Amino acid sequence: MSKEVRIQQIKRITKNEKPVGRLDIPWKDKLEPMDVYQIPLNYLIYNKYNGRILSRTKSYENQNLKIDAESDAGKKLIEDLLWDSKEQKNKETLASLKKIGQEKVGIITEDGIIIDGNRRAMLLNKIDHIDYFKAVVLPVEYEGNPLEIEKFETKYQLGEERKLDYNPIEIYLKVQSLYMQLSGKSFYSPDTVDKKAIKKIYEWIGNYKNIKNVNDIEYTLAVMNSMDEYLDWFDYNGIYTTLDEREEQFRGLTSWLINFYGENSKKAFDDYRDDDVDDLKTLCYDLIRIKYKNEKFRYVAQGQKQNHFFGNREIWESFQKEHRKITNSFDEPKIDVNIKNLEAHLNSIDSKFKEDVGKHLDENVDNHYTKLRNKQSQDQPEKLINKALDSFESINKNNKNFNSKSVQKLVEELGNKVFDSLQKKSPTRVLSHIINLMEAIDIEQIPDDEIKDVQNKTKRIQQIGYQINKSI
């Protein structure tokens, strides 16, 4: 059915058929009472840019694929995206619609584009005995006044009139789209921000989830910038589905970047540079990529300088060095931009990255968090020494790995550090410890192939003892 035919048929219904109800609609800054009509479902077209699936449709179109909502293929694609967006809730709503029919009224334009109720219409299309959609018809075609429709949709679905349960990423895309339309700018920059556009967006949205005031609109745009830069870093440009389940990490990273850029933050290590902040950003991309737990993600740069890695130069450099070593071991696959399902392809690459290096990245965070906690306790030697003793005691000395050269070298290094500390503080304790160690040697247990070496070392001990005794 062409657009012209849809317009004619919908006008015929609104002129000749009796309304089935009335609904107050916030249209052009006034609350207008509008009639509700039963519109045949086959007169309607899904809005491919509706808020529920905006990230999905944009991701699809950014693969140079066209969604023709008026075609059978386009209709099927949008229906699948709507179903997958809230599958469990859709099943529940579908059961309710089959039992009691459509309760919530939808909203459409004069040319049959669904502004509110895309999900309900999709579900009604799955029910054989229902062939109409109860809706208010706005006095405008979809392309007739796009900004007014955008304003209406935003206020009606996100504003005070109604709260729609958008997926997190959809909010950021929505705010970004509104800002670009209202400001005429192609991107958000805090240096050239259009304050009037920011204020208007907040007026339209009102309080919604993380948006509580005008400043939160700018922060939302800054987070969206971080998301876009992340996609660009991995050559995932415009594939917004790869941002799923990563919102909180992006919000944290964005706050850190705002605080640290400019080289004047008191929460970073002394004399840091913006280049260090660049390193922080790209390192965090790897953790975001594996959907790293937010409670551990915060160890990287959250809070006062004594509480995170980026607040201590020694720990940060060690953490970053090991992190880069781990990620450099991953053989990054080449992206096949011509593949049919690019979204699944990119998700597969991310899953492979997590499978290969995720565990090692997590261990690196844990190891350096332990170092950070030890730094925090550096003036509590008894506490740290007891912790070291407990750690050493917990080792299974009978495990074959304990006798490996690498482990024994570490044990020797630990012993040397202890002896060095004792020597500086109390040579008597060092000598007492040596005597205890020598007295504990079971001569009968010395292997034949080590006898000669033992004889040489005991002679050397005698020589050193003689020299010390003579010197004092």
Image: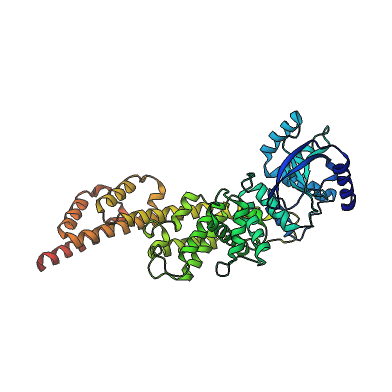
**Foreground residue among 470 and 81:** 81
Image position, residue 454 (x, y; %): 25, 57
| Residue at image coords 79%, 37% | 126
Image position, residue 305 (x, y; %): 38, 60
Q: How many numbered discs sit on the rendered protein?
A: 0
**Foreground residue among 64 and 143:** 143
Look at the image and tell me whether residue 195 can be seen: yes
Task: Locate residue 394: give its quadrant.
Answer: top left
In the displayed structure, does residue 470 sit left or right of residue 183? left
**Foreground residue among 106 and 19:** 19
Look at the image and tell me whether residue 334 can be seen: no
Task: Locate residue 93: give its quadrant.
Answer: top right
Q: Residue furthest top?
A: 99
Pick the quarter of the image with the C terminus. bottom left
**Foreground residue among 337 and 41:** 41
Q: Is residue 238 above or below residue 124?
A: below
